[in-house]
Image (cartoon, rainbow, N blue to C red):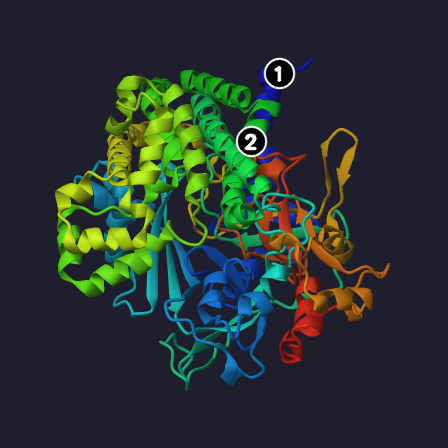
Amino acid sequence: MLSAAFLATLLCAPSLRADEGMWLLPYLKQQNIKRMQEMGLTLSAEQIYSPGKGSVIDAIVHFDGGCTGEVVSSQGLLLTNHHCGYDQIREHSTVQNNFLRNGFYAPTKKDELPNPGLVVTFIDEIVDVTDFVNAYLKKAKCNDPMEYLSRKYLSKIADAWYKKNRGKKAGYVVLDLAPFYEGNKFFLSVSKEYSDVRLVAAPPTSIGSYGEDTDNWVWPRHSGDFCVFRIYTDKDGKPAKYDPNNVPLKPKHYFKVNSGGLNENDFVMIMGYPGRTNHFYTAAEVAERRDIDNTVRIDMRKVRQETMLAEMRADEAVKIQYASKYARSTNAYKNAIGSNWAIRKMDFEGMKKAQQEKLAKYATENNKPEYIEAMKKIEEMVAQRADFRRQVWMIDEGLIRAVETVSAPVLDEKTFAELKADAGKRRKFMDEKYTTIFNKDYNKEVDRKVTKAMLTAFINGTAAANLPAVLRDAKDIDAFVDRLIDKSIYMDAAALEAAITTGDYATYNADPVVRLAKDVNARFKEVKDKVAGFDREFARVRKTYVKGVMEMEGEMNVWPDANSTIRYTFGQLKGYIPRDNVYYGFQTTMDGVMEKEDPTNPEYTLSPKLKDIYNRKDFGSYALANGKMPVDICATTHTTGGNSGSPVIDKYGNLVGLNFDRNWEGVGGDINYLADYQRSIICDVRYVLLILDKYLGAQRLIDEMDIAK
């Protein structure tokens, strides 16, 4: 019989799972292409990754630095998620033309809306520059990881490499040199940046963000999370600033759209820009994540949310004010619970211990004591920083993110004097900074109750010596909070503005809100600096540890943690069993959209037009064989934040959907892939086509796409 430790070691081996990993494209041929083809892929490695030669990568953009998008026509038409384009849609919305509420469609190219500041980038090449970087660092005598792993320092090296190997850099060329495998490898992405990106179409929020925060991390899902842009260039096809005379981009590649759909177990691939993962965690780091990061977040947010919920249930006006705040809080709360659920259920700590035991054995047999020493140092430093780390999380979750007055925009003496002397600056501060907290959605009575609950929980969970100065003397929490709410000038905009205009700084600085905000943030910085004191040595030993894992497993069997660089992942459309006697299928339909409708909840309201389309079953050719209209699908692919908007393609390279979320049961996949639970949540492209066609009347966009059955 196999031992539990040996089984855990097998489970840790990246090469044994088909669906795990956020893989590097330059290694596609060596690592996964054969396995992908065995699963059904018909494309060659060159058809996927040959930058500038009309391959899949040439149709994918990094959208606004935080999302992914894909080109779907020969005229630069671009799809991404509604939540990725939300800021642009909001910027163009007015009371008369509320595109968030009503949706938007530009009937002609002349009506497409420019978006100053929005950029997308296409990758021209990805180069392994490890040798160049190491030689540069050696020559510069730089061995400080806090310096050479920083983007600022690496940008200097990127410029040096480009100048030496490519010559003069055009203004639209963007270089991104990033460390991989904790600094054991370095890759340089060379991209072209396009800044004339225009809004073409967007569904209303009631479709694009259906379920909003409540449904975040949730499957089954029913959101039409997409919007449409177009990329423009100058007349020579080069990137250019907005100009009415610019012309639509002629891409090197664009995706055909699969309107026929797929079946369960069919192959899919996703390519995009995942943000951050931690799959090289040691056992000590897993325990730290579980017992400090996640546990503090869960405990503190539970107190806040229970207090808010009681107030929301008691008063409909408060429910409207705090619904969004409550939902945002529950998002990270659900994530932390899901993460701890996975850590415990799958015994991540035991799995990592088994991997470390395997590495220790390898190190002993191969005379590599540095790997054993690295694991020992990591464990020691995790223990040494534990108290400071817990304080950071307690202040952040218990005060900064929970008590609204702690985030009040307080002034230092210099800024106070500047605002006092300049009425224009003073008005701007009141209009833009003050209202970020104290606005129509702020209720001081709710804040009073939440603050009392949070300060009680925070003080009870924190050693007296570690409290922010202002709280050390707070013997009576109720009285302290009542004074905070009843006596502060921040509770009245006119009083605050008058205090700045005619008052003195000493009086202002003694205000209870000012004192609380300043003391809390000062203590927060102090303990964050304590934790940061471990970072330099921690980076060194983690680099050594990961080098050992790569050496033991073989570099081609190990994928680097996500770091907002382009990756691919592959798997199958597949449902899952979240718990006993429950099965979630791989596909949702408009039946579920209608079932979730709640006219009293802004997250689940539906427009009469969408209900009419449903009631008449006006689904055109986009419906399933049984007459139902598909909305979302889920797949076993390995994604995380940053993959929003990523294209989901079939075995022929045709677009079948847009990735926009992942399920609650799979959030632990940032540490270790969960084969039976991990699912990417995807907007079915047929729902995109339906909304464009039947809801927005955007037939010209349908005609522009290359639709494949």
Taking the view exactly as shown, the residue that stands out farthest to the bottom is 245
Mark 1 sits on what residue?
4
Point out which mark residue 337 bears: 2
Q: Position of residue 185 (x, y in %)?
A: 37, 42
- In the visual, does 79 lie left or right of 504? right
Q: Is residue 271 visible?
A: yes
Tell me the residue at 50%/37% (across/down). 558
Image position of 437 with respect to 380: above or below? below
Residue 672 visible? The answer is no
Asked whether, in this view, residue 601 is left or right of residue 359, the answer is right
Could you give the CA–CA distance between mark 1 and mark 2, rounded to whole angstroms? 25 Å
Q: Is residue 358 above or below residue 245?
A: above
Q: Nearer the viewer, residue 341 or 212?
A: 212
User: Helix or strand or loop: what does disc 1 sit on?
Assistant: helix
Image coords of residue 163 (percent x, y): 24, 61
Vertical side of 297 occupied by 569: above or below: below
